[in-house]
Image: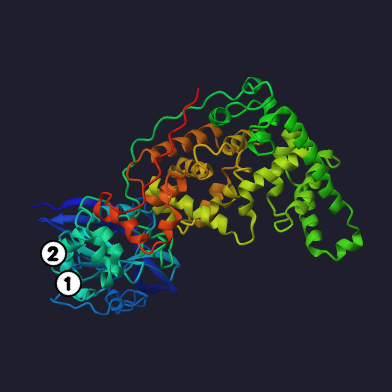
Amino acid sequence: MDPKLIFEKEGVYLHTSVKRNNQDTSIPGFIRIVERGGEPALEWSPLEDAGRSTPAVFYTKKDGEGGDEDTNFDPGYEPDWAVISTVKRAREPVPVKDTDEWSFSLPLSELYSLRRARFSLGRNFLVLTSRGGHPLPPLHFHRGGTRGLLRALQRYIILAPSPVDGRLFLAYPHDSGALSQSFDELQLLDDGGSDLVSRFMQDPYATTFGGFSKVTNFFRGALRPPDSPLHTSGAQGANGHTSVEEEPGFELITCGAELGPRPEVTRGKPLNKWEEFLDPEGRVQNPEQIKELVFRGGIIPSLRKDVWKFLLGFYPWNSTTKEREDILRTKTDEYFKMKVQWKSVSEAQEMRNSLLKGYRNLIERDVNRTDRHNTFFSGNDNPGLTLLHDVLMTYCMYNFDLGYVQGMSDLLAPLLFVTQNEVESFWCLTGFMDLVHHNFEESQEAMKQQLLQLSILLKALDPELCDYLDSQDSGSLCFCFRWLLIWFKREFSFEDILTLWEVMWTRLPCDNFHLLLACSILESQRGELIGSDHDFNTILKHINELTMKLDLHTVICGAEAIYQQLAQCKDLPVKVKEVLGLYAASSSEEESPEFESQETQPMLLGSPQPGGAPPAVPPRPVPTYP
């Protein structure tokens, strides 16, 4: 019977123990899953045709040829079975079949584990270990593809995270008897494990007490039907966060949710009427409709000055014309009181106030290079520069703990341009900073969190792109840092930013719409990134060179379409829902010691159970616009 090819991926490099010129050697080749006589096997073979697109072989092991070979291959870590010292071996393993000097063919029934490792070249490698305890040479997916391989493997085996090592995934066949036998071998339960699966299905809470609580994540995968994708990426603690250090590049088993088709999204006309939304006393009658219109099409330039002050909280939506006059008068007095504080500091005083002096130096430096191409800020003696400087210095007095951080001038410049008013631009800036001030804090925790949330979204949307970025050590998405810090200010033209920001200030369709915009941009570049010869540095260079080359209309439409696609998915993972604001657990549930088991039960059994996970907030309806 002819062999049946199930999966094939080119550009998978085998990392040998041979060294030439003191450099580690990698051999390009193919990874395949092949069925022979109904027996699936995982195979790797070197590239035979030098005319293919993969780079030529650097070095091939041949008898008598140069290079010092280490016959005892050292994978750079303890053998996998040593991690769980209680594993017993009941039979002699089938040896790995060598089909060439560096080729291998491993029956999947003999695959013991997969492990992510990083050593030697500083890249991420996938290391396979047979049930005989023999680690195979590491494989590096130069062009991505690990997720595709794991999806194909899931047709034949279950891959479950080790309860003691988040980088290690153990392989099990698709039958519950084997699972019980495996738990007997691991000796994780005091009593016999022969009916473990049935007991768990009947009473998951009681079964998870004691020894079995160590392997909750194992059952997330083990009890899933053979054709279901796996969800987990590592052992989790009671708060739902990974208890081991997460390493980008091996979140191989992610959300697994089947997303429906992405809907077509169109933009509308900009908001071009304002007075008709005001009642006789000047109150805005339908703020939500205004926000929806602004989200759909932006605002015409002549109305921006009025509407922005509401979007940024300078005026309450329900304020009357008279009340707004009082607010402006009060806010003007408050602003100039703060301005006088720094204006009245003498040079001698400032010499003894290093913090204020440092803020002033940073502001003066940044003001001189902020949007100088715009006529409002161009020239050496432009009054716009003075206003920019004064507003930023006054903000330091308003929020002295934060003070001034590079990038804040980028946020102020459009506000000053639109309002053409020192006081109004200042209070609009404070409203804007209420949304983004965490971005500028020294700890950078908020930025790290947003990059993590962006990664969660991208993994749900495009696992292949994530896999490729991981393979090039770019899985942290740090090249998106500037996008998120100043809300794409330097990626689009000045006029486009006015539209983009007013769209984002509506907070529709969710608070994290800026992350969806980033996803839209990254997906638009997948063709350029995947299959290319990019590495970390060239990926960063490519992303930076997108400045002023992106089409705002396409990016916004793509982001809204992504939101609708995710919001309509019935099996969207909780972490994705949380990013989109579609899920919320009560504080009492989060503090409960049973919260973890409640949260994981539907993931294990495939359907909600009484007393199970806290109900998800119904998806926020996709906005409709007049």
| Labels 1 and 2 touching (C-beta < 8 A) | no
Question: Which percent across, then down, holds residue 623?
Answer: 47, 31
Depth check: give the residue in front, 243 or 11.
243
Dot 2 amino acid type: Gly
- Element marked by disc 1: loop
Depth check: give the residue in front, 219 or 246.
219
Q: Earlier in the sequence, mark 1 or mark 2?
A: 1
Structure colour scheme: rainbow
Question: Which percent across, then down, holds residue 480?
Answer: 54, 50
Name the residue at 24% across, 79% down: 86
| Residue 523 against residue 150 in the figure, above or below | above
Name the residue at 21% across, 50% down: 227
In this rendering, position of residue 107 left or right of residue 312? left
| Residue 311 against residue 82 in the figure, above or below | above
Q: Is residue 50 visible?
A: no
Depth check: give the residue in front, 474 or 603.
603
**How many marks on residues?**
2
Question: Which percent across, then down, holds residue 258?
Answer: 31, 43
- C-alpha gap between disc 1 and disc 2: 24 Å
Name the residue at 63% across, 36% down: 311
In this rendering, position of residue 610 left or right of residue 346? left
Question: Which percent across, then down, holds residue 152?
Answer: 25, 53
Which mark is on residue 136? none
Residue lying at the far left of the rendered structure: 1
Q: Quadrant of residue 382?
A: top right
Which mark is on residue 95? 1
In this rendering, which labeled residue sits more in front, label 1 or label 2? 2
Residue carrying label 2: 177
| Residue 7 against residue 422 in the figure, above or below | below
